[in-house]
Image (tube, rainbow, N blue to C red):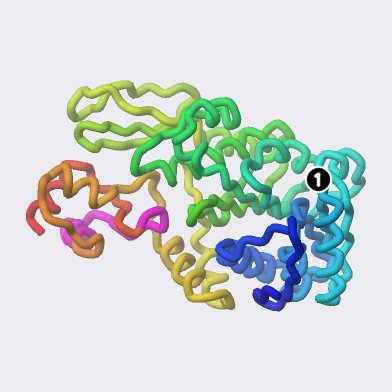
């Protein structure tokens, strides 16, 4: 028996549940709890044991829960768990494609948590949305998004990844950019609420807005990330095609990644709002605090990488942050990497501060 929140889950062979994803589920429940009414409709199209739908039903006001599970034996496990938890949900032994092409309803919240990429199912999921729908999306194909499998990233996401210390953020932004480009085909723009990279997965919490203006606003947030492997320069640009080719500091050819979302990826007001009433574990609370306090600028600086390049001893991120703030720069920790910071200081200024610490 596995207990999480108010859910009690019984396992059987073949029914997958990842305890490490509890933080993701805790944040999901907190977000739905913030705005859900009894009439709020929720779709869990990759139900597995049914834990997400069960937690939404038991921990929020939402009572219109639909679950899909394509595997017949796993669907029986989910049905047992729904009954055991006294949840009146609509469980269907159907594929996402079959359901999306026959359903006559749309949903207020859709929580897609597949094994691997969201790409095979996202287009069909978009057939089930309306203006204001919240999309919660999980990707576990981090090796692809983070550049270890570059050809696969080009094939699946139509984007070149970055395989260096920035890969967790660039991978997440590639994922978000892919969602935005797919949503635009249905005349929707995306509004990021929370975007996180944790352990072996990436997670997006988004709200869809219908109309040409919203779609165009999303397109304007797409662009590219640049990185210089020689001097450490990095930057982004919002353009249809990248303009920068060489590093402005040392003229080295830049490593360019994209297309990706280069705009804001967190809604701080919403994050702090749910953090005040968060009922998940301490790890989730800490993550929300870090994300909420994170400087809203693309890309971060890895201190181990910088200090190795400078040939100096290790430096605490907090010491560097304080040193930069004394020079009137903005600097914060980042959830992407505990040994990295985000700042509006350039690489030369960062190096000077590091040397003096």
Counting from the top left corner in percent of width and height, residue 261 is at: 50, 39
Counting from the top left corner in percent of width and height, residue 99 is at: 87, 44
Which residue sits furthest front? 13
Frontmost residue, 72 versus 40: 72
Residue 229 lies in the magenta stretch: no
Residue 325 lies in the magenta stretch: yes
The residue positioned 45% from the left and 61% from the top of the image is 291
Q: Is residue 10 left or right of residue 287?
A: right
Frontmost residue, 342 versus 326: 342
Counting from the top left corner in percent of width and height, residue 91 is at: 87, 59
The residue segment tinted magenta is: 320-337
**Residue tagged by mark 1?**
128
The residue positioned 7% from the left and 55% from the top of the image is 356
Q: Is residue 80 left or right of residue 305?
A: right
Q: Is residue 97 left or right of residue 292?
A: right
Q: Quadrant of residue 81?
A: bottom right
Frontmost residue, 259 versus 71: 71
Residue neighbourhood size for the residue with mark 1, other residues' Cα within 10 Å, grouped as few (<14), some (14–19), many (≥20): many
* Disc 1 element: helix
Q: Is residue 237 left or right of residue 89?
A: left
Counting from the top left corner in percent of width and height, residue 223 is at: 47, 32
The residue positioned 87% from the left and 40% from the top of the image is 98
In the displayed structure, 296 sits above or below 231; it is below
Q: Quadrant of residue 148?
A: top left
Q: Quadrant of residue 119?
A: top right
């Amino acid at each position: 028996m596995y207990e999480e929140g108010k859910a009690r889950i019984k396992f059987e062979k073949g029914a997958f549940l990842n305890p490490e994803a509890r933080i993701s589920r805790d944040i999901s429940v907190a977000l739905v709890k913030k705005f859900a009414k009894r009439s709020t409709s929720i779709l869990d199209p990759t139900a597995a044991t049914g834990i997400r739908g069960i937690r939404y039903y038991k921990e929020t006001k939402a009572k219109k829960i639909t679950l899909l599970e394509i595997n017949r034996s796993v669907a029986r496990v989910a049905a047992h768990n729904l009954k055991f938890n006294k949840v009146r949900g609509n469980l269907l032994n159907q594929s996402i494609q079959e359901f999306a092409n026959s359903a006559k309803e749309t949903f207020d919240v859709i929580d897609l948590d597949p094994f691997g990429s969201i790409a095979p199912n996202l287009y069909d999921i978009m057939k089930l949305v309306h203006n204001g729908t919240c999309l919660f999306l999980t990707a576990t194909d981090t090796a692809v998004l983070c550049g270890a499998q570059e050809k696969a990233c080009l094939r699946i996401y139509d984007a070149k990844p970055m395989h260096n210390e920035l890969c967790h953020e660039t991978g997440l932004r590639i994922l978000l950019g892919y969602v935005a480009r797919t949503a635009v085909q249905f005349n929707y723009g995306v509004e990021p609420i929370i975007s996180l990279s944790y352990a072996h997965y990436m997670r997006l919490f988004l709200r869809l807005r219908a109309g040409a203006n919203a779609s165009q606003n999303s397109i304007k947030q797409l662009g590219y990330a640049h990185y210089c492997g020689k001097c450490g320069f990095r930057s982004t640009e919002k353009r249809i095609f990248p303009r920068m080719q060489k590093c402005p500091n040392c003229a080295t050819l830049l490593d360019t990644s994209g297309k990706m979302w280069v705009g804001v990826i967190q809604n701080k007001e919403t994050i702090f709002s749910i953090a005040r009433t968060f009922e998940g574990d301490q790890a989730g609370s800490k993550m929300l605090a870090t994300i909420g306090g994170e400087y809203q600028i693309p890309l971060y600086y890895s201190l181990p990488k910088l200090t190795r390049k400078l040939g100096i001893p290790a430096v605490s991120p907090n010491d560097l942050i304080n040193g930069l703030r004394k020079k009137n720069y903005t600097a914060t920790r980042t959830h992407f990497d505990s040994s990295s910071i985000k700042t509006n200081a350039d690489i030369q200024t960062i190096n000077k501060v590091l040397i003096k610490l």
